[in-house]
Amino acid sequence: MYYHQIQLSPCISVRPSLMLKPRMVQTSGEVVKTERRRVDHCTRVPRNVNLEKLRNGYLFPEIGMRENEHLQKYPYAKLISLGIGDTTEPIPDIITSNMVEQAQALSTVKGYKGYGAEQGNKSLRKAIADVIYRGLKVKDTEIFVSDGAQCDISRLQLLLGSNVTMAVQDPSFPAYIDSGVIIGQAGELQEETGKYWNIEYMKCGPQNNFFPDLSTTARTDIIFFCSPNNPTGYAASRKQLEQLVEFARKNGSIIIYDSAYAAYISDDSPRSIFEIPGAREVAIEVSSFSKFAGFTGVRLGWTVVPEELCFANGFPVIKDFNRIVCTCFNGASNIAQAGGLACLSPEGSMAVRGVIDYYKENARIILDTFASLGLKAYGGKNAPYVWVHFPGSSSWDVFDEILEKTHISTVPGRGFGPGGEEYIRVSAFGHRESILEASMRLKNLFR
Amino acid sequence: MYYHQIQLSPCISVRPSLMLKPRMVQTSGEVVKTERRRVDHCTRVPRNVNLEKLRNGYLFPEIGMRENEHLQKYPYAKLISLGIGDTTEPIPDIITSNMVEQAQALSTVKGYKGYGAEQGNKSLRKAIADVIYRGLKVKDTEIFVSDGAQCDISRLQLLLGSNVTMAVQDPSFPAYIDSGVIIGQAGELQEETGKYWNIEYMKCGPQNNFFPDLSTTARTDIIFFCSPNNPTGYAASRKQLEQLVEFARKNGSIIIYDSAYAAYISDDSPRSIFEIPGAREVAIEVSSFSKFAGFTGVRLGWTVVPEELCFANGFPVIKDFNRIVCTCFNGASNIAQAGGLACLSPEGSMAVRGVIDYYKENARIILDTFASLGLKAYGGKNAPYVWVHFPGSSSWDVFDEILEKTHISTVPGRGFGPGGEEYIRVSAFGHRESILEASMRLKNLFR
């Protein structure tokens, strides 16, 4: 169901005079009647105009709903979900055992811990700086541990406020645009283009090697850039990121760089924007343990805000972000943080690497499958996503046909922006047997 | 350190022309020089005007800093923190063992779970509805599991946006006002009063039995109301809450009711706003496992949005809040949720109750201590906080004197708003021996 299709409640027809009649609340008998009749009282609080601008439901809950509808239609179908990019393989023991230890410690006088630092435990911040950003001069004090990248994207929007302009890759992860709409940056949605008036869409596809033509890109305050990209699976090259950083420096923009899939990079593409000289004055990096260590349900991520990054008035961005984190967040779960620390130990890193390689082998199988069918498929080498082109087709139609005929759920590219039309995203997360089974079903459908 | 005392970075003096000179980024040598010289590039992104309006640092990090400064001055002092309301007693085994089980399951093929529902696990939502709201007709689908009340307060502000007016109890938990300032509801801070122009401060003190005079309270869209109150420790009576609900219904306002301390109520004061007839059309309830089960570091809470609650145009608030939760949040940690479920089992509830009673005995000892010194102390009976009056004194002076002379940290009432001046908040969280030791030190200071 789309949220914009929601039935308005009966009270919209109630006359204000009636809504305000004190007798409605003065006699309890009346009140009970009120309750039984359900909504016959409306507040006078205006609905947030920004939320009115969000037209459709958030993509992934919607796909979940379509999967459920499909299962109601075919109760005996073995649905294979290659849709929502959700990890499927067990978390290595060495990591969960650290969480187990932390949970047990909470039942001891010595080991009990209450509130941690809002920014995260020192030990974890230091491990992220030392292991993930080895050699990049990222300080532990510049790292803010979060409950996940998506949550921090919305906190970054709170930080920046409604008075800034934003650019996104098209296609891109929907949370960038939706959080921008919610905070009031997006302007009106243009029905004909499916684009928000105030957002700069940077088209990325095979035609431009999945990197925007910056010579025709308008200057914006914020540039969301995700690499390896979700959904296209393409990892930007060093040269491309150097161009992006130069573009941001020239325009006085802030890059919000999403490196949630960096651990999947196989070639020499940068794993962090901070590998690029000059990035510390123009970039924030958002990242996550979700796809790195299978923490999608455990909830743990981080954001790096370099000390050098400042607003036009010279005020350090890190000071304001620290304030947002202290006021609107209260730290990630101490148990999840214990797990994150284990991921960054030498043994933990090895174990995590094994799981990542497993997903990458899945991606290879999916790539080969589509290639063998003569379909153009991208990504998959530096990311757990394969981006498949169906020239001339509507991505929702392709999604529906594949779901209907193979019981495989994917993601329609259109859900990632107008630039995703004609494409579907296929996730490489899944047990090997499901991937092989899916490969067989797809071959039968498209052969 | 106060954030408004921060040194602006050198780049504020850099001429825009210089900032934009391409050579700064074109030759890597220059860039290295740039990095070594630190900030000599400023973005052109305007600082969020709302954040400029937040004058002081967030209260609790500040108190932490003062404690640290004190320990540097007196390295051998045994600091007793009765300041930041942080739980200290171990979490009962029956609860952590459920978290241990969940963490271990994540290492098994059968037990691994990825993303959960953004709104929380069905079983936990149902348990909260059945146990916490027994008999109150709150549906599990109206419950949104969160990573804590403070985080949900900020998500509720995102939901409501900048175009609404708000009222708060004075004194009150700083996050209500600060999150309102960040989203743009507060207006300018008036130096002379210490109040934000656009916020209605509802003074609550002994003079009005800690309940605002509603006949002189201006109509606002939102009314934040916390009971049992932090910091005063006062739980509103049924009659008072009936007045509040009637007031909200008459004015078409939404009450955001914070019941994070409801488990500490000893008398027949309502534990939920939904005990009051007519509340479902005008109230949202925010609550937490933090003080209920010692989950301050584990991070788990919930928010109830009744289906009947609508905006002025009749649109159901629950639909928009669901959208916020799906876009800006990704669910609470599945391990924390397993712990929450255990808290609500019969055995878990018993165990949790034991810890709460322990803190309440602490509160009694603190109340008796101040009473024996002839000081007026409030709260403590229905809440883990004691609110002590020092007529004619500045609350920061009292805080400093107590810290300096007894090595006990409290919270200056002024930190909770202008109405907190002359008061300090003393937390009853702590090991019994610390509470007894603190009682002795306070008696020696004030006798």
Image: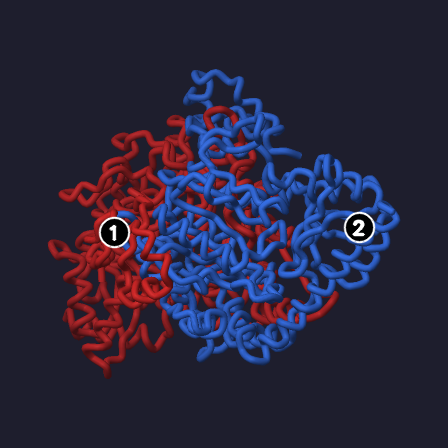
Chain colours: A blue, B red
Task: Examine the rendering and report whether any part of residue B269 can be seen.
Answer: no
Report which residue position mark 1 lands on.
B18
Q: Position of residue B338 (x, y in %)?
A: 60, 62
Q: Which mark is residue A79?
A: 2
For disc 2, the neighbor class at 10 Å (few under 14, some 14 to 19, many from 20) is some
Q: CA distance from mark 1 to mark 2?
A: 59 Å
Give the amino acid type for the residue marked by disc 1 in the picture.
Leu
Q: Position of residue A117 (x, y in %)?
A: 39, 66
Q: Nearer the viewer, mark 1 or mark 2?
A: 1
Q: Residue at x 76, y 62 (%)?
A: A431
Disc 1 and disc 2 in contact, CB within 8 angstroms: no
Question: Is residue A193 rendered to the left or right of residue A243?
Answer: right
Q: Position of residue B168 (x, y in %)?
A: 32, 42
Q: Position of residue A96 (x, y in %)?
A: 61, 73
Q: Residue at x 34, y 48 (%)?
A: A252
Q: Quadrant of the N terminus of chain A?
A: top right
Indicate the chain on which mark 1 is placed. B
Question: Is residue A85 rendered to the left or right of residue A188?
Answer: right
Question: Is residue A437 rendered to the left or right of residue B94?
Answer: right
For disc 1, the neighbor class at 10 Å (few under 14, some 14 to 19, many from 20) is few
Image-quadrant location for residue B221:
top left
Task: Examine the rendering and report whether any part of residue A39 can be seen.
Answer: yes
Between A14 and B22, the one lying in front of the other is B22
Q: Up-down: is B365 above or below B13?
A: below
Q: Up-down: is B162 above or below B47?
A: above
Q: Are callouts 1 and 2 both on one chain?
A: no
Q: Up-down: is B266 above or below A56?
A: below
Give the amino acid type for the residue marked by disc 2 in the picture.
Leu
